[in-house]
Image: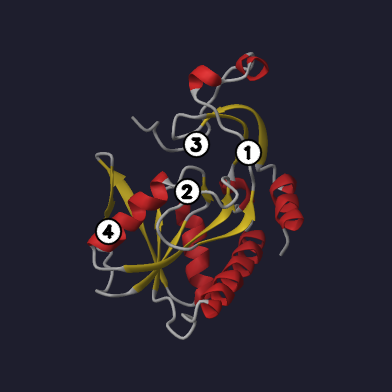
Amino acid sequence: MDKQTVLEHFKASGALLEGHFILSSGLRSANYLQCARVLMNPERAALLCKALAEKITTGLDADGLGDKKIDIVVSPAMGGVIVGYEMARQLGVDGIFTERVGGELELRRGFEIPKGARVLMAEDIVTTGLSSRECIKTITEHGGNVVAASCLVDRTNGKVDIGVPLFSLMGLDIPTYKPEDVPADLAKIPAIKPGSRDLKK
């Protein structure tokens, strides 16, 4: 699935927003990708995640890791829950998620990661890589071996380093700004925070 096709899915579902947005990192942006909207249709979610799963399998094969399959998918709540579940379904493995408790990501609900399990960390969107790295840290602390990470959209267009190979369906280079550096035309638009996560302090 090429970038244009992925972008059309976001546009068709009303998931590509324009305005003045406050990201969970505290940075500002003129565009926001609301993955919950592109994933609200089960058929579209399956189509996108199937393409991503195939990309991951091909990529791991190229690295000589394809014979060592992924054992479990772990994602950070809230944004990663749906995509993590669907990635697990496409890969034929279990999918669990971490939750933020007191500012830290934790495993709850009786979820466990078998010691040494090969883990795919699945996100919806990667912007700064902060939540990805936090989730990977939690997985590692619980005995998992994160062999790869995935997201539908990499907003850094390949620039972010989260410590493991990152597979995405689409890379976008969307500018972000510190609050004090917002361009004048963007500053004229009231800023809103559309995501579910509290601002990083």
Amino acid carrying mark 3 in the image: Gly
Q: How is the image coloured?
A: secondary structure
Q: Residue at x 24, y 74 (%)?
A: 115
- Residue mark closest to the camera, 3 vs 4: 3
Amino acid carrying mark 1 in the image: Ile
How many other residues sit within 10 Å of disc 2, few (<14), some (14-19) or many (≥20)?
some
Q: Are marks 2 and 3 in contact (CB under 8 Å)?
A: yes
The answer to whether residue 15 is left or right of residue 53 is right
How many other residues sit within 10 Å of disc 4, few (<14), some (14-19) or many (≥20)?
few
Asked where in the image residue 70 lies, by quadrant, the reply is bottom left
Residue 99 % position (x, y): 33, 50
Residue 68 % position (x, y): 42, 83
How many other residues sit within 10 Å of disc 1, few (<14), some (14-19) or many (≥20)?
some
Q: Residue furthest bottom?
A: 67
Pick whichever of labels 3 and 1 is earlier in the sequence.
1
Residue receiving disc 1? 174
Residue receiving disc 4? 109
Q: Are marks 3 and 1 in contact (CB under 8 Å)?
A: no
Can residue 180 be seen from the camera position used here?
yes
Pick whichever of labels 4 and 1 is earlier in the sequence.
4
Residue 114 to residue 156: above or below: below
Residue 79, numbered circle: 2
Residue 195, numbered circle: 3
Pick whichever of labels 2 and 4 is earlier in the sequence.
2
Asked where in the image residue 121 lies, by quadrant, the reply is bottom left
Q: Quadrant of the C terminus?
A: top left
